[in-house]
């Protein structure tokens, strides 16, 4: 940070003046007019210049803000890809069969994870974000923004694919009977996210190559989709896709069941939250069995509790 400050301090007086400040904001990706408006927040003591300490504190804030925008765009784009292919799969199921549909969704999930994991961590599902907060691996402060971005991505993709989305949303939210639908959403989501956590833990421990993680997740998604399709159950597993479908359907005047979409939203959330304590129990048992150090998520929780 000091090196950057010295390069931007053109007159070498160890302070940044207002004429020097646009260069700072250009580095941060801001336009000149925005740079002039941002000078006052940087100049916290109001002396008309920016000291090294003021620069360091606010540069970190700007970097975090810009990083969050990239993360949210990545989440919206990734969920948009998944929502788009969900529409295609729901409409094409009768003609291409369950195996092809499951493979297509698995490939879509893998592509979305590969594309977004370096930017946002590839949550791509409000249920996964909620479970990550519960496990202590994700900040509660960032969770609402992530969930809203995921929902926005699903809505945009669903609206762009509106002809398919009408059929998709109708089949999802009107899927009877309600109790069977809820049980399927909770049960399948529980197993799905439990396996996700186990795969992630294997990657963190170095037992599974990082590049193979998304492929493993895609295989799990395809396997569960094929199983549920064979059993005649149409589960959503992603609250953003379910709620996005309902909102797009409502905008197009298609009648939908709010109870049904509630199952598609809350079922995966309940299932993912139930998977968190079971994952910790399995992790503890495995650590005791192999006499290993506590795994990634539990190690962070233990460190946080100790401090």
Image (cartoon, helix red, strand yellow):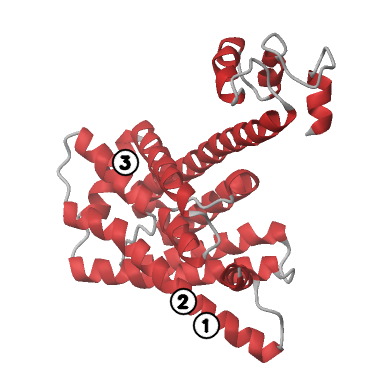
**Residue 10 falls left or right of residue 115:** right
- Can residue 177 be spotted in the picture? no
Quadrant assignment for the N terminus: top right
Mark 2 neighbour class, 10 Å CA radius: few under 14, some 14 to 19, many 20 or more? some
The residue pinned by badge 2 equals 277
* Mark with earlier residue (3, 2): 3
Q: Quadrant of residue 155?
A: top left
In the rendered image, residue 24, in percent from the top left (x then y), is placed at 70, 20
Q: CA distance from mark 1 to mark 2?
A: 6 Å
Mark 3 neighbour class, 10 Å CA radius: few under 14, some 14 to 19, many 20 or more? many
Select label 3 or label 1 by which is in front.
1
Q: Quadrant of residue 14?
A: top right
**Residue 90 falls left or right of residue 81:** left
Q: CA distance from mark 3 to mark 2?
A: 35 Å
Q: CA distance from mark 3 to mark 1?
A: 40 Å
The residue pinned by badge 1 equals 281
Residue at x-position 52% and y-position 82%:
281
**Residue 73 falls left or right of residue 171:** right
In the rendered image, residue 305, in percent from the top left (x then y), is placed at 56, 71
Residue at x-position 43% and y-position 40%:
149
* Residues at marks 1 and 2 touching, judged by CB atoms closer than 8 Å: yes
Disc 1, SS: helix
* Mark with earlier residue (3, 1): 3
The residue pinned by badge 3 equals 165
**98 or 283: which is nearer to us?**
283
Mark 1 neighbour class, 10 Å CA radius: few under 14, some 14 to 19, many 20 or more? few
**Residue 185 falls left or right of residue 120:** left
């Amino acid at each position: 940070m000091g090196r950057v400050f010295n390069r931007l301090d053109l007159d070498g007086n160890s302070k940044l003046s207002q004429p020097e400040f646009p260069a700072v904001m250009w580095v941060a990706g801001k336009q000149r007019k925005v740079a002039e408006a941002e000078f006052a927040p940087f100049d916290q003591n109001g002396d008309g210049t920016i000291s090294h300490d003021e620069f360091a504190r606010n540069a970190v804030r700007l970097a975090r803000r810009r990083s969050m925008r990239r993360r949210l765009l990545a989440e919206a784009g990734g969920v948009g890809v998944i929502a788009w292919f969900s529409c295609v799969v729901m409409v094409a199921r009768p003609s291409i069969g369950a195996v092809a549909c499951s493979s297509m969704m698995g490939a879509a999930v893998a592509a979305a994870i590969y594309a977004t994991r370096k930017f946002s961590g590839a949550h791509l599902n409000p249920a996964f974000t909620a479970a990550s907060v519960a496990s202590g691996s994700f900040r509660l402060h960032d969770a609402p923004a992530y969930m809203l971005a995921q929902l926005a991505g699903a809505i945009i993709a669903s609206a762009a694919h509106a002809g398919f989305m009408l059929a998709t949303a109708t089949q999802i939210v009107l899927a009877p009977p309600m109790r069977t639908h809820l049980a399927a959403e909770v049960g399948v989501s529980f197993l799905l996210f439990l396996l996700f956590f186990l795969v992630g833990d294997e990657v963190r421990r170095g037992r599974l190559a990082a590049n193979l993680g998304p492929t493993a997740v895609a295989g799990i998604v395809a396997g569960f989709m094929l199983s549920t399709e064979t059993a005649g159950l149409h589960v959503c597993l992603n609250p953003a896709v379910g709620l996005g479908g309902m909102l797009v359907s409502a905008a197009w005047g298609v009648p939908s069941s709010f109870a049904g979409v509630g199952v598609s939203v809350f079922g995966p959330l309940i299932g993912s939250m139930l998977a968190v304590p079971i994952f910790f129990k399995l992790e503890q048992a495995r650590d005791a069995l192999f006499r290993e150090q506590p795994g990634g998520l539990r190690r962070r929780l233990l460190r946080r509790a100790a401090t």
